Image (cartoon, helix red, strand yellow):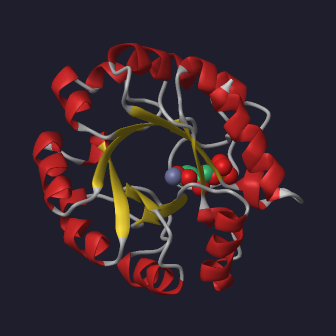
Amino acid sequence: MSKAIISPSVLASDLSNLAQECKRMIHSGADWLHMDVMDGNFVPNITMGAPILSCVRDNVPEIFMDCHMMVANPEQWVPEIAQAGGKSYTFHLEATKEPEQLIELIHSHKMLAGVAISPETPSSAITSSLGSSADLLLVMTVRPGRGGQKFMPECLEKVKDLRQRFPTTNIQVDGGVGAGNACQCAQAGSNVLVAGTAIFGSKDPKTTIQEMRTSVNE
Ligand code: DX5
Ligand code: ZN
């Protein structure tokens, strides 16, 4: 069984106070902080990039920044994100023609490599050699581009398939995830749960994180 990892998505935080928000989540039990990098090209929204991440790293040196790169040309940002303190770099399979070379590039910059698939991409697009070289597989449970959307339970079939094929790899779900459906995600085989609205919108993030963790460990 892979370790439970809870990764609050800072997109739902008070972004004017980002470093403090990250500290608050670490004190509430977060393992990772999920940083949604959007370029206005791969997705219609623009969020943050390496300059902001490096300020967060300087203020919160203990942070594990789980970088979800919703960008066209993901090869371009690997050195900058590594330099800014990114610990994992998850790119979209839909955004590159050479995913295996990209994984090597990410590893050469000492980050964990993640491969994300959007709802329209089947799990079969993750070949056995690709899945075996990745450290993390991200199954999106909403269309990438913004927080606060409704969870798509049908995407969990892909989680099941990937868990069967890659028993020890981290499998992450992202989009509309919270304490209410964490069990469903974990039962399908996910061990890395991302949640923005559910955690930052909670009156008691510590309990919400704990509930989500328990769902994975059960
Ligand atoms: C969506 C982002 C998600 C999002 C999750 O494109 O990748 O990480 O911030 O937010 P919630 O949990 O609110 O759906
Ligand atoms: Zn994300």
Q: Position of residue 212 (x, y in %)?
A: 71, 39
Q: Is residue 199 above or below residue 162?
A: below
Quarter of the image where one finds residue 131: top left
Q: Position of residue 184 (x, y in %)?
A: 68, 22
- Name the residue nearer the viewer: 35 or 212: 212
- Name the residue nearer the viewer: 21 or 138: 21
- Name the residue nearer the viewer: 132 or 92: 132
Q: Is residue 178 above or below residue 72?
A: above
Residue at position x 67%, y 81% from top? 20
Residue at position x 33%, y 15% from top? 165
Residue at position x 50%, y 72% from top? 62
Q: Is residue 105 above or below residue 144?
A: below
Q: From this viewpoint, is residue 178 visible?
A: no
Q: Residue furthest right?
A: 203
Residue at position x 67%, y 42% from top? 176
Q: Position of residue 73 (x, y in %)?
A: 22, 59
Q: From this viewpoint, is residue 158 visible?
A: yes
Quarter of the image where one finds residue 65: bottom left
Quadrant of the rendering where the C terminus is positioned: top right
Q: Position of residue 18 (x, y in %)?
A: 62, 79
Q: Is residue 8 above or below residue 163?
A: below
Count the marks: 0
Q: Judge left or right: residue 116 versus residue 63.
A: left
Quarter of the image where one finds residue 166: top left
